[in-house]
Structure formats: C-alpha cells, structure tokens
Amino acid sequence: MKWRIPRLKELYKEKLCKIGQAYSKIKPGSRIFISTGCAEPQYLTANLENYPASIADTEILHLVSLGESPYLKSTCKDMCRLNTFFIGHSAREAVKRGDADYAPMFLSEIPKLMKSGRIRVDVAFIQVSPPDPFGNCSLGVSVEASKAAVDCANYVVAQVNKNMPRTLGDSFVNVEQLDAIVEYDEPILEYVADPPDDVSRRIGFYVSRLVPNGSTIQVGIGSIPNAVLENLKDKRDLGVHTEMFSEGLVDLYEAGVINNRKKSFHNGKIIAAFCIGQKGLFDTIDNNPVFEFYPFDYVSDPRNIAKNDDMVAINSALEIDITGQVCSDSIGPEFYSGIGGQADFVRGSALAHNGRPIIAIASTAKDGQISRITPMLTQGSGVVTTRGDVHYVVTEYGIAYLHGKSIRERAMAMINIAHPKFRRYLLEEAKKLNYIYPDQELPPEDGSLYPEFYSWNYKTHDNIEVNIRPIKPIDEEKLRRFFYGLREEDIFYRFMGAVQTMPHTKAQPLVVLDYEEKFAIAAYLGTDEKDGQEEFVGVARWFLDRATNKAEVAFTVSPHMQGRGIGTYLLQRLIDVAKEKGISGFTAEVLAANRKMLSVFYKSGYKVKSQLDSGIYDIEFNFNDVMEVL
C-alpha cells in the first residue's frame, strides 16, 4: 500500500509494537473494553493471563463473546472480572455463579454513557482492518460501542488483522487515535447458527405475513430469526435497518429480495451496528458500499429507527404473560441474555409510519413441558418490553394483536396462540384473576385446532378487496360491532325476530367453534394481521346435524356491502369446506320476504328443495344433486 500522508505512515510505525509492549502500559485497576462478537481481538485477549501485573484488579467491559472468553478462566478469576452488557453463552454460567456481572441497559445508551463518563473506559482492545492510504482503519464487522470506546479510552490497543473486512459508514478510526498497534493475522471468529426447527419455521411463516413488500426490517440471529428470513424469499424491495445481522439476511440481499430501494432513511443502504456469521458473510460486506455500519447510539436510537417508513422490528422473548408483558433477559431471577436492542426497536418501529413491532416466541419450552405464555410472569422475571409497547405477538399457533386492547381482549388473544394443551389452564387462571368473563369458553379440547389454512380473497365488481377466514374466539367484539351495524330488517331476516342486543352471553356461542360441528367464516375489509382493526362485512356459518349429516346454514352481509356477490361467495366457501368434511348437504330456514337470500340459494348450482310453512321457507339441497347446465 502507498501511504498518501507520509506523517501518518511514520506515526503507524512508531505505534507498532509487540504484545508485551502493548500490555506494559496498562495499569492495575483499569477498565478494559473489548470489541464485540466476531470482532473480538482474539490474539490480545488470549494473552491476558500472560500479563498478570497489567490486568490485576481490572474490569472487563464487553457486549457478547463468541470465543473462549479467556477472562473467564480460573487462572484470570482473581485478576479480572467481566461486566457484560449482554449475556452470551460463554458468560452465562459465570454470571449465574456470581463470578461475572451483568449490566442491563438499552444498546442505544451504551455509547452515550461512555461519552458522558458514567461508564468509564480506561483501555480499549479493538480489532481493525489494515489502514487505507489516509491512515483509516475500519472496525469491520463490529462498530456497535467500539467507536465510542476508542473515543473515550485513555489507551487504545488495536490488533490489525488483514482478515478483518473493511466496512463503510461511521466505522473508521485513524492511526492517530491508536496508542498501540499489534499486527497479528488470524481468521475472524465465526458463528454458526442452529438451523430452524419445525416450530421456528411455523413462527417464521406467520411473521412473514406481517412483512409487506417494500418494508424495512430488523431481525437478529437464532432459530426463529433465521426461519423468518427463510420465509421472506418471496417478498420484494425489502430494506434493512438493524442492530445486527447474519447469513440469512445476506442470502436475501444476494437474491435481490433486499435492495433497499424503498427505504425512507438511508435509501439504498443496509444499516447495522455489527454482524455475526461466517467467512461468506465477511466477504460480502468487505468494501461493499451497500452495507454501512454505525454505532449503537445512531442505529438503535428510536428516533432514527422511526425515520424508516413501514419499519418491521422482529424480536424474540423468553416468556410473555397474558396481559402482554415481555420478559427477554431472564428466566425468573436467573439472568439469561440481556435487554439488547428490543425496547429500542419496539418503540422505534411503533413510532414509524406504518411500523410493526413483533415479538416472536415459541409457545412452549423444555420439549413442550412448560408454556412460555403464562398467567403472570415467573417471580423474579424482568419486563423488557411493557404491555403498553407490545403490538404483535407471534407463536407457531398464530398472531395476536394487543396494542390498544383491553386486558380481557389481550388475555383471550394470547390464550388463542398458546399451545393447545395449556389453553384450558390459562383460561381458568385468567378467570381467577378476573381478566375475562367467568363463563368464558374455549373450543372443545377434542375439536379441531383453528384451521388457519382456510383463507380466501374476493374482489367485488367495483374492485373492493374482501378477505375471508374462519371466525376465532377473539372475534367476539368484531362480531358485536358487525351486529350493531345491521339494519332492523337484516337482523329480523337473520334471527327470525326482533333481536335488540348482542351481549357476551349471545355472542360467545357464535365465536367459540369446534370447526367440525360448528363452523363459521367472516368476510372483512382490511388485513387482520396488520392492526387488528378489520371490519366484518359478512358472516356465514353452518351447524351440523350428525343424525342427518346435513348442516343448517345461515349468512348475513352488512347493508353497505350488499349487492356485491359477497353472500354468494360465502355460501360457496361454506359448501367447499362442508364437502371436504364429508357433509352431504345444507338446510336453511328463510323468511319468505327475504328474497335476496332465497336467490342466493337458488343460484348455488344445486337442486334446491323448498317448502313454505307459516311464512318461512324450509330449504334443503344435497351436494351430489347438481343442477344441469343447459
């Protein structure tokens, strides 16, 4: 390399030293910051125990370690003590034993606290790329809090490693900022994530339904995040603003799914604070102008996150109670991970235009023996994301939208996505807590699970998009709103009388279904996964009579949506499901004055038998008795 500034070339040579010289200037009692994850300067940290006089009574500040963490060895125990901002695998047992400390805080605040002096940094151990012709070394795969540590430390030791990728953004430190330079080339630490299991893939599928084309995403690493990324392969024009990323995100970038074209903040760029992965990832980001790395106080600042329109933040949890309190850093009183950037991104995405904060969690732990959805958080658990901040919760059993909902609505929504074997328990506990109606019911335990695979879309002749899905127990309030939007004549036709109200006692049997003998679907405007505010504009249902193997059918359409073929479409979908379940035909009772409903039956394509009695038609038709087309 040809240096463009000779003065910096000479300065680099002056600061170049052996590791022993670098350690010799460290004083006992210092606070030593070590770069994070794959950027950990292994050569520097591996030699800690070789210089006991320098590291005597020191405190190691660190975010998360992927290496062997030599500062946790028994030989170093009496010389240095780890204080970590996030508990990784290598530090977990030490923190549990009380041999290491955990400092819970938002990632966005770590650089600020360093700059203010409230987190004192005496020494910074960093790993950087070789300098460019202007003396700038890149912090590479991990800028996070390292940039602030360099700015604040009294003594900066840099391991210069030719294998460190040169990343762009606010990732550079000049040789003038370094006090000791140790050249040592070694492979960058790598991380291999566990492949997604079936539960994670199911969660990933549901989360993907909440990610619209053109949105900007934040997603971390692990089985669930990787499953989410796998399910985004069919999306278009995604952007990225995230604290960290791994291989799964790079795969989407290389496939063209992530192109950042529609980002409203840093258009065309992937913004991150650090990354964790393998050599293929490092090669992709090396000197790639699409990837820009910035410190935590920039990337994870909720105000910056909110500048991304359609921001989708995807985070995980350890436990969630039925009111929506999220614990992500401990199992009871035992600290397990950390606050990380969850609260920052949940709040930032909530503030963004059309933003969507998502908490993704498997419904159970310990091979299905423990429910992660609980009546109350385990004693000692900490709340990382408050119930007021939670919007979406996703398990392998579906999506619950909690924001703006009452405790009763939240409890039912969370029970609905819990593992089926724990739902009855959660229901009874919710009753004891007076969270829900004392007579609240769930579908029979021997009934079918919610058939989410039934989903249809219908476009009216005037191009109105209508979505259709089976009704859930949590739809009680939506059904009541639908009822109160009907005209008197619609109610009279549907219920054969002047029904005035739809209280809980009447509404509950209409939404608590077994999907075998009681089946109902709703047509709605809007997307229920988006904000939980979809408007029911049609409801159709059947009740099976096992003795005759025929089901009684009924349907109603909102006044402002009548005349658009919705009733006909709903009836056809009910017929499809009934035939699939082996039901032989439908029956119905229709007031003679209800000419519209009679017309729908006669246009069904089947030979309809009808008999008039006291102003009511008894309708019947068999599915094997199809009208002949002339």
Image (tube, rainbow, N blue to C red):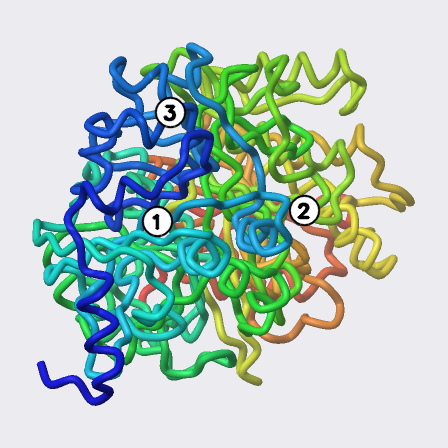
Q: Secondary structure at mark 2?
A: loop
Q: Residue at 28% across / 47% down in the picture?
A: 226
Residue 230 visible? The answer is no
Asked if the residue under mark 3 is in contact with the one under mark 1, i.e. CB atoms within 8 Å, the reply is no
Q: Residues within 10 Å of mark 2 (few under 14, many from 20)?
A: some
Residue at x 51% of width, y 48% of height: 341
Residue in view at x 45 percent, y 36 percent: 30
x, y (%) of residue 284? 16, 68
Give the mark, 3 or 2, whose residue is nearer the N terminus. 3
Q: Quadrant of the N terminus?
A: bottom left
Distance from Cα at disc 1 to Cα at disc 2:
23 Å
* Residue 56: mark: 3
Q: Residue at position x 32%, y 56% from top? A: 142
Q: Which residue is mark 2?
A: 389
SS at badge 3? loop
Above or below, comparing residue 536 to residue 74 in the picture: below
Q: Which residue is mark 1?
A: 205
Q: Looking at the image, which residue sits at the far bottom?
A: 4
Q: Nearer the viewer, mark 1 or mark 3?
A: 3
Q: Quadrant location of residue 320?
A: top right
- What SS does tag 1 mark? helix
192, 2: nearer the viewer: 2
Whether residue 279 is visible to the viewer of this picture, yes or no, is: yes
At label 2, the amino acid type is: Asp
How far separated are the C-alphas under marks 1 and 3?
Answer: 51 Å
Q: Position of residue 167 (x, y in %)?
A: 26, 70
